[in-house]
Image (cartoon, rainbow, N blue to C red):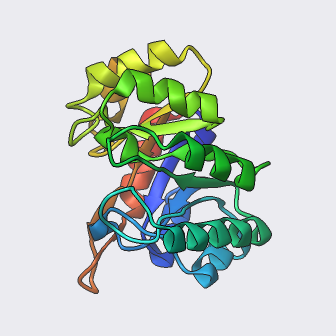
Amino acid sequence: MTLDEIEICCGSINSAANARLGGARRIELCQALSEGGTTPSHATIRTAVEDLRLDVFVLVRPRGGNFVYNQMEIKTMEEDVRLCKKLGVKGIVTGFLTEEGNIDKELTRRFVELAAPLPVTFHRAFDECRNPDEALEDIIACGCRRLLTSGCRPTAQEGAETIRRLAAQAGGRIAIMAGSGVNHSNAKLLKELTNAHEIHASCKRPSSCGTEETDPEEVRQLLETLVR
């Protein structure tokens, strides 16, 4: 794999700086990882782009909980996408479901068009969908460039068989990115088991300030394991 195919999930600007220190080139930037991640502040995004000079993919999600949003939340998310484009990010990460557990095709397509020419990653809302095979086709049809998934299981290793099947079904039409529970000790095996095109990992460890932050040494070891 190349550095461009490995994404480090960072829940703060300190984590982003640590990811860079460990050798990462590309990050997914968010906050509130304990809630599954929400959109970071615009100041955080600007700092990651301009000062750290990372390839920043920004999570656009207004709250934790489910992936069915009301009109005010959608309006906020649209404004976040517009501001992200102005700040020079490399991509948008988002996802929408209907109350029935299907991909919300109308909203997904709208955000793909709004984000253009930036690529859109459909995130792990996918792992809560009713029918993964159908959902994958819907996501491809909407124009998403990547799908982040744990194979509809708590971790990517547990969902490896499903991820492998999804990668085969995708047939190169979309990049399948395996994430959740990925670390330097299982990343190489996971890549072999899933045939995933890309890998997503947070590389978190407890920090001295009482939070979990990306650990630069774990990032370095992960990259050493995967990059060749």
Any part of residue 74 in sight: yes
118 above or below 187?
below
Q: Is residue 13 left or right of residue 65?
A: right
Q: Is residue 164 left or right of residue 8?
A: left
Q: Which of the two residues, 71 or 139, is positioned nearer the viewer here? A: 71
Q: Which of the two residues, 96 or 27, is positioned nearer the viewer here? A: 96
Task: Give coordinates of residue 95: x percent, y percent.
Answer: 48, 50
Quadrant of residue 182 in the image?
top left
Task: Give coordinates of residue 132: x percent, y percent.
Answer: 36, 27
Quadrant of residue 173 in the image?
top right
Figure quadrant of the C terminus: top right
Point 52% across, 57% down: residue: 28
206 above or below 161?
below
Any part of residue 228 in sight: no
Point 39% across, 57% down: residue: 68
Point 62% across, 41% down: residue: 4
Figure quadrant of the N terminus: top right
Task: Give coordinates of residue 197: x percent, y percent.
Answer: 52, 27
Task: Give coordinates of residue 181: x percent, y percent.
Answer: 26, 45
Quadrant of residue 208 in the image?
bottom left
Point 64% across, 66% down: residue: 78
Q: Is residue 135 left or right of residue 23?
A: left
